[in-house]
Image (cartoon, grey):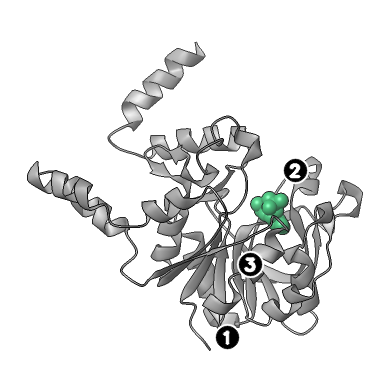
Amino acid sequence: MKRIRKAIFPVAGLGTRFLPATKAMPKEMLTVVDRPVIQHVVDEARAAGIEHFIFVTGRNKGVIEDHFDKQFELEATLERRGKTKELSELQRDLPSAGQSSFTRQQEPLGLGHAVWCARDIVGNEPFALLLPDMLHHGPSCLAGMMQVYEKSGGNVLAVNEVPKDQVHQYGIVGVGEKLGAGFKITSMVEKPKAEEAPSNYSISGRYILQPEIFALLEKQQKGAGGEIQLTDSMLTLANSQDFFGYQFEGRIFDCGSKIGFLAANIAYGLEREDLAPALRAEIKSVCE
Ligand code: G1P
């Protein structure tokens, strides 16, 4: 079985839901506590053993590339001032030379198209895909999915139960035979109406996919919302390959929504020893 070495991060979206914050700054650079959202997701991928980080960007996203590059002046200044902890943290977070790639999605044609834009960089090997809007809080979700993959092969999607009145916001899967930390996926539909959804298990933005998906994406017709949908190509691939659902144990924050983003800041803040006591007191006093 081929090892998963590469991960795709689609970061081309315009972030219109966060205007005016995202007028001149990519939404992926909004911070949850003191780390940009995209850094949290890269951390999760690295914890799962990913070696190469592929960013599918768009216009006005140059700062993401800068964020994952060395900052000589800053490092020299930190060194001169003896700030060794900050310096080593910066160095730890940086992909090594040659371990990141950036390509552009030239038109906003949908998630399926964004993934297809990375086909040459991925090549003929299975890969991970992480949507930065969705923060999976707790142990690395992708690491848990890797364990499922190592046992079963095929394709693995992280899934999450959502209230029935939210199924129209997500890709929804059909639930088959139970297996360890998840189940066999029997069907998939992108953004169904509540009455047409096969279950209330949503695809939560973490995927392990086989490279055969690229040929399907290449000829994929537009689907929900007039966009080229990854879910539609996965459904076709499911005719010839297995798909497994992996139930993540931690909490998932949809940072594409304002409430999800604010809640993530509270949860990640409360997890920090240096911040939790004071933050708890502040929340209490604000709520009084
Ligand atoms: C995308 C996927 C959808 C998935 C969701 C998770 O939708 O198409 O299947 O459930 O991400 O966030 P989007 O949020 O880009 O509309």
* Sequence-earlier tag: 2 or 1: 1
Label 2's element?
loop
Question: In this rendering, would 94 be left or right of 37?
Answer: left
Please give the name of the residue rendered at 63% of the width and 81% of the height, measured from the top-left corner: 211
Numbered label attached to residue 14: none
For image coordinates 74% across by 52% down, the residue present is: 170
- Residue 40 visible somewhere in the drawing: no
**CA–CA distance in space, label 1 to label 3:** 14 Å
- On the image, numbered disc 1 is attached to which residue? 124
Left or right: where 6 falls relative to 104: left
- Residue 163 is marked as 2
> Where does residue 204 sit, x and y in percent of width and height?
64, 55
Residue 106 vs 254, above or below: the answer is: below
Q: Position of residue 195 (x, y in %)?
A: 91, 49
Q: Amino acid at mark 3?
A: Val
Crowd rating for badge 3 (residues with CA inside 10 Å; few <14, some 14–19, many 20+): many
Horizontally, residue 151 falls left or right of residue 35, namely right
Q: Are marks 3 and 2 in contact (CB under 8 Å)?
A: no
Helix, strand or loop under label 3: helix
What is the x, y in percent for residue 238?
76, 77
Which residue matches tag 3? 115
